[in-house]
Image: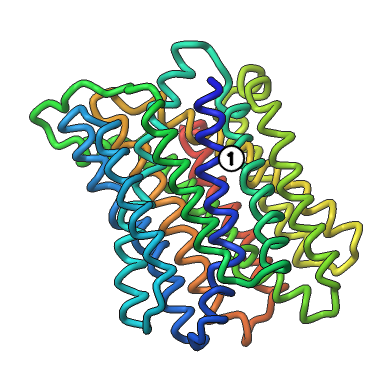
């Protein structure tokens, strides 16, 4: 299990470098705001489109670990190449290759992790929390390194983490699924009402986060909050996420997956309603603690639910398509729509719409219980 904990730490450590600092790296390299926006869109677009093809290949060939190693090696090579000075077209090309490999790597291994935890009776939430810890550690460490040197340290740090990802993938369990039968696995998944339901609920939950991920910091900065307070608000959310992941196994055992997912959607709506209604610092900190449920509990419960309802022969495809549609489409569309509406509608209105979106997700999720 130590290898799997290290794997999660390393995978999400890379995200802790990319999310906060890659756009800053591009800005210091002289790219314009429009160019940075276009480059930043490459990874979420690839996350939506490319991983399902890797997953189908993994299920058909029964060689999940082999493909994960290819993805890790490709991400390492392309990630290192991001350090080479290039214009917009060159940077876009390298970033596209990087995203094509990097967005496939973690989903290919996660199914193996779930199988290993299932066999050992271990808790997925307690495993996944190491990813959150890795994210926090590298956000802080990379920020300190930039202060000491410059943004040119971003890609060397990222490359070191990608090398760690490759080495750790070598020592993860094989966990290869049996070959897929002659049927169309993806079509059979999408024809399953239970699978469609969790995908739609997950997409709506992530869609409701669009204002938060895209404009929460900009909104608070615009009304005069200090950078340190904004950082504390973000940190409160991640800390709450870690705590609920520690307790997630107990919650799911006691309440069941359906109740945890439904409660998470309710609390997500409450979170966005509170954020829309006031700039009171205590209320905003209270709202941020609900990240424990709008992300932490919902993520753990949804991953476990998909694992349980998807046939073993298409298990990789099931997880990857869920992630692509919920996180890729949900967050991507959410941020894009908020980008168009932010100046005209304002953050409070958009957070109110986010609350409504979470409630629509709740309606989708609880409908079977009423039938």
Residue placed at 62% from the left, 35% from the top? 130
Q: Residue furthest top?
A: 120
Which color mode does the image show?
Answer: rainbow
Image quadrant holding the C terminus, namely: top left
Q: Is residue 209 left or right of residue 364?
A: right
Tell me the residue that label 1 is attached to: 131
Q: On the image, which quarter does residue 126 sit in?
A: top right
The number of numbered discs placed on residues in the rendered structure image is: 1
Circle 1: element type: helix
Residue placed at 75% from the left, 67% from the top? 276
Counting from the top left corner in percent of width and height, residue 21 is at 59, 66
User: Which is nearer the eye, 351 or 131?
Assistant: 131
Counting from the top left corner in percent of width and height, residue 63 is at 22, 30
Q: Is residue 190 left or right of residue 213?
A: left
Question: Dot 1, how many residues are within 10 Å of its Cα: few (below 14), some (14-19), or many (20+)?
Answer: many
Counting from the top left corner in percent of width and height, residue 352 is at 68, 66
Residue placed at 44% from the left, 50% from the top? 326
Q: Residue furthest left?
A: 182
Q: Is residue 102 above or below residue 198?
A: below
Q: Is residue 47 above or below residue 84?
A: above
Q: On the image, which quarter does residue 44 sit in?
A: bottom left
Residue placed at 74% from the left, 47% from the top? 290
User: Which is nearer the eye, 301 or 166?
Assistant: 166
User: Which is nearer the eye, 35 or 60?
Assistant: 35
User: Which is nearer the eye, 177 or 192?
Assistant: 177
Counting from the top left corner in percent of width and height, residue 50 is at 28, 54
Q: Is residue 177 above or below residue 160?
A: above
Q: Is residue 332 left or right of residue 87?
A: right
């Amino acid at each position: 299990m130590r290898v799997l904990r290290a794997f999660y730490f390393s995978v999400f450590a890379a995200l802790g470098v990319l999310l906060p600092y890659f756009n800053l790296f591009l800005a210091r390299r002289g790219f314009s705001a429009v160019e940075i926006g276009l480059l930043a869109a490459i990874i979420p677009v690839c996350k939506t489109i490319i991983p399902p093809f890797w997953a189908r290949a993994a299920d058909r060939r029964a060689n999940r670990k082999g493909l994960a190693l290819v993805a890790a090696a490709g991400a390492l090579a392309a990630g290192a190449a991001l350090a080479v000075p290039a214009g917009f077209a060159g940077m876009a090309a390298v970033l596209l290759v990087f995203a094509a490999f990097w967005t496939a790597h973690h989903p290919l291994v996660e199914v193996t992790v779930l199988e290993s935890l299932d066999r050992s009776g271990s808790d997925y939430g307690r495993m996944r929390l190491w990813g959150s810890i890795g994210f926090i550690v590298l956000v802080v460490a990379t920020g300190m390194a930039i202060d000491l040197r410059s943004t040119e340290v971003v890609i060397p740090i990222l490359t070191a983490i990608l090398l760690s990802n490759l080495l750790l993938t070598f020592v993860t369990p094989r966990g290869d699924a049996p070959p897929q039968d002659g049927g169309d696995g993806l079509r059979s998944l999408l024809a399953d009402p239970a699978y469609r339901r969790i995908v739609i609920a997950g997409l709506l939950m992530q869609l409701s986060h669009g204002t938060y991920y895209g404009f929460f910091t900009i909104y608070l900065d615009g009304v005069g909050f200090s950078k340190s307070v904004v950082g504390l608000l973000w940190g409160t959310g991640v800390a709450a996420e870690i705590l609920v992941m520690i307790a997630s196994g107990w919650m799911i055992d006691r309440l069941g997956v359906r109740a945890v997912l439904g409660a998470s959607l309710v609390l997500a709506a409450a979170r966005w309603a509170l954020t829309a209604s006031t700039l009171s610092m205590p209320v905003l900190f209270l709202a941020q603690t609900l990240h424990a449920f709008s992300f932490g509990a919902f993520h753990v419960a949804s991953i476990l639910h998909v694992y349980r309802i998807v046939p073993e022969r298409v298990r990789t495809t099931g997880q990857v398509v869920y992630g692509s549609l919920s996180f890729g489409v949900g967050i991507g569309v959410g941020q894009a729509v908020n980008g168009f509406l932010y100046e005209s509608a304002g953050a409070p209105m958009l957070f109110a719409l986010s609350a409504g979106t979470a409630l629509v997700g709740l309606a989708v999720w609880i409908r079977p219980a009423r039938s």
